[in-house]
Image (cartoon, rainbow, N blue to C red):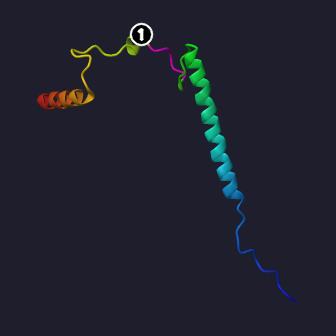
Amino acid sequence: MSEPQPDLEPPQHGLYMLFLLVLVFFLMGLVGFMICHVLKKKGYRCRTSRGSEPDDAQLQPPEDDDVNEDTVERIVRCIIQNEDSE
């Protein structure tokens, strides 16, 4: 009598389910992005949290001495101010 030989390849169902799950989450994110994009074009605001409405002061950019100041200058100024305060 011959014994049945075990399968040499493990089942790949888990791997297929993983790819399917990643694909589903990717498509859900893409659909959410597209919905948010369409709503923004119509004038709505898309947020990820349910917090209260931000104040108008938070929406305005900070008023500094130089409006066209680049980020590197701001970082250098913050470092210099922190060194002086210590």
Q: Tell me where residue 23 appears, x and y as whole percent.
A: 65, 44
Could you tell me how many numbered marks the image carries? Answer: 1
Q: Is residue 86 above or below residue 24?
A: above
| Badge 1 amino acid | Asp
Q: Is residue 58 left or right of residue 53?
A: left
Residue wearing tag 1: 56
Q: Is residue 70 above or below residue 56?
A: below
Res 77 quadrant in image: top left
Magenta segment includes 14: no
Res 80 quadrant in image: top left
Q: Residues within 10 Å of mark 1 (few under 14, many from 20)?
A: few
The quarter of the image holding the N terminus is: bottom right
Q: Of helix, strand and loop, which mostly describes the magenta segment?
A: loop
Please name the residue shown 66% across and 46% down the image: 21
Question: Is residue 6 or residue 41 the one in the foreground?
Answer: 41
Q: Tell me where residue 20 appears, x and y as whole percent.
A: 68, 48
Q: Tell me where residue 14 appears, x and y as whole percent.
A: 69, 57
Question: Is residue 57 or residue 16 the one in the foreground?
Answer: 16
Q: Is residue 44 above or below residue 4?
A: above
Q: Is residue 47 left or right of residue 78?
A: right
Q: Tell me where residue 63 appears, x and y as whole percent.
A: 28, 13
Q: Is residue 24 above or below residue 56?
A: below
Residues in magenta?
50-54
Please name the residue shown 25% across and 26% down the image: 70
Q: Secondary structure at mark 1?
A: helix
